[in-house]
Each structure stands twice: as C-alpha cells, then as structure tokens.
Image: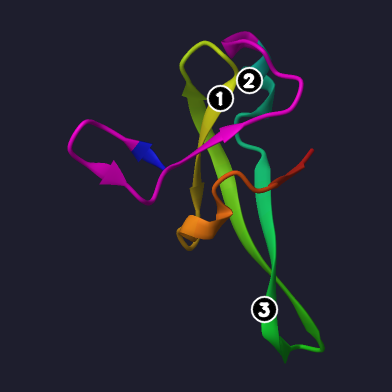
Amino acid sequence: YKRARMNQTNHTSLIKLENVADADGAKFYLGKKLCYVYKAKTKKKGTVYRTSWGKVTRSHGTSGVVRAKFKNNLPPCSMGGKIRCML
C-alpha cells in the first residue's frame, strides 16, 4: 500500500515491476492492466481461481516502482505476491 508516516492509503498499491530499474522504464507501463490471481476455497463459475483487476496510474519514485489502483482493494496477504501485467 501507499503510506505516509501516520496514514495508509489502501486504494493505491505500490508494484515493483520485473526488469524495470528507473522511472523512464516505468513510463511504458502507464495505463496497462494488472491482474492479481488468487485461489479461493469454493468454486464459482466452475473454477476456484479468482482475479482482481487494476490499472497502472503513475510511477512512484525513481527506481521503477509504479502506483496502481484496483477495482477492489488488494488484500493484505497479496503483499510480496505476484501480479500479472497485461501488455
């Protein structure tokens, strides 16, 4: 999550992209769709896998990290997990 000293912003996630080392490299990903795939216990629509979709909104800093907003906020257990980027 994006956070400050006192506040945490749940609707904005910080995503470190693979093989992106600077802010110029992150510009390519602006506007791209992101997908968080997770596994649930019960089946819905014939599968136990579910997705949460989001979009890259802007870069964050100079080390290739981007900010992303998801339709539904990402769960805390997704920290450190994999997120798919749809090119």
- Ranked by sequence position, the earlier of labels 3 and 1 is 3
Q: Residue at x 58, y 51 (%)?
A: 54
Tag 2, which secondary structure? Answer: helix
| Residue 16 percent across, percent down from the top left | 61, 30
Dots 2, 3 in contact, CB < 8 A: no
User: Which range of residues does the magenta coloring cover?
Assistant: 3-24
In the image, residue 61 above or below residue 74: above
Tag 3, which secondary structure? Answer: strand
Tag 1, which secondary structure? Answer: strand
| Residue 38 percent across, percent down from the top left | 69, 66
Q: Amino acid at mark 3?
A: Ala
- Ranked by sequence position, the earlier of labels 2 and 3 is 2
Q: Amino acid at mark 1?
A: Val
Could you say which quadrant of the image residue 32 lies in? top right
In the image, residue 73 above or below residue 14: below
Could you say which quadrant of the image residue 51 lies in? bottom right
Q: Does the magenta portion include 81?
A: no
Find residue 65 and name its label.
1
Which residue in the protein does label 2 denote?
Answer: 26
Could you say which quadrant of the image residue 39 lies in? bottom right
